Image (cartoon, rainbow, N blue to C red):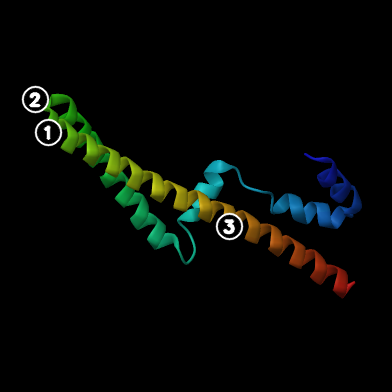
Amino acid sequence: MSKLDQMIEEALDAEDRALFSKHAEPGLFGETAALFAGKLGPWNMLSAAMQVILFAGALYSGRAFLAAGDASDMMRWGGLCLLLMIAMSVIKLMHWAQMQANRVIREVKRMELLLARAKAA
């Protein structure tokens, strides 16, 4: 926890602390599970399934690369394996970006809640 977080924590009253502890920041597995909920959940499920398919293809092409007899076959299978691994990485980066966006949105909503409570008081 940074010094700024400590200062914010000290400025909150008991009711606000209880509210924040109720809506605590989820861990890595909680954020990953949140990808598959909400409006983008079905699309994220589809992209995760596609990532599994790409991984299976990369394994197959990597095995074929190792079993290839001549250099031209090795280039083809190695290139395909590399391409599939890059595609998997792109999907993974999309998921990480979505997790970061969800984290920022959650913090903005917390601030909105605090502002609404301060306005009501």
Circle 1 Cα neighbour tier, 10 Å, few/some/many (<14 / 14–19 / ≥20): some
- Distance from the alpha carbon under mark 3 to that under mark 2: 47 Å
Looking at the image, do the residues carrying marks 3 and 2 touch, with CB atoms under 8 Å apart?
Answer: no
Q: Residue furthest bottom?
A: 120
The residue to which callout 2 is attached is 69
Circle 2 Cα neighbour tier, 10 Å, few/some/many (<14 / 14–19 / ≥20): few
As helix, strand or loop, the secondary structure at mark 1 comes to helix
The residue to which callout 1 is attached is 73
- Distance from the alpha carbon under mark 1 to that under mark 2: 7 Å
Q: Nearer the viewer, residue 1 or 93?
A: 93
- Residue 74 drawn above or below residue 85: above
- Which badge, 3 or 2, is on the more N-terminal residue? 2
As helix, strand or loop, the secondary structure at mark 2 comes to loop
Quarter of the C terminus within the rendering: bottom right
- In the image: residue 86, left or right of residue 103: left
What x and y, as percent, mark residue 101? 58, 57
As helix, strand or loop, the secondary structure at mark 3 comes to helix
- In the image: residue 116, left or right of residue 36: right
Which residue occupies 73% across, 61% down?
110
What x and y, as percent, mark residue 58? 25, 38
Which residue occupies 40% across, 49% down?
90
The residue to which callout 3 is attached is 101
Q: Nearer the viewer, residue 37 or 71?
A: 71
Q: Nearer the viewer, mark 3 or mark 1?
A: 1
Quarter of the N terminus within the rendering: top right
Q: Of the residues shown, which amino acid type is indicated by label 3?
A: Ala
Query: What's the mark number on residue 23?
Result: none
Q: Of the residues shown, which amino acid type is indicated by label 2?
A: Gly
Looking at the image, do the residues carrying marks 1 and 2 touch, with CB atoms under 8 Å apart?
Answer: yes
- In the image: residue 25, left or right of residue 68: right
Q: Of the residues shown, which amino acid type is indicated by label 1?
A: Asp
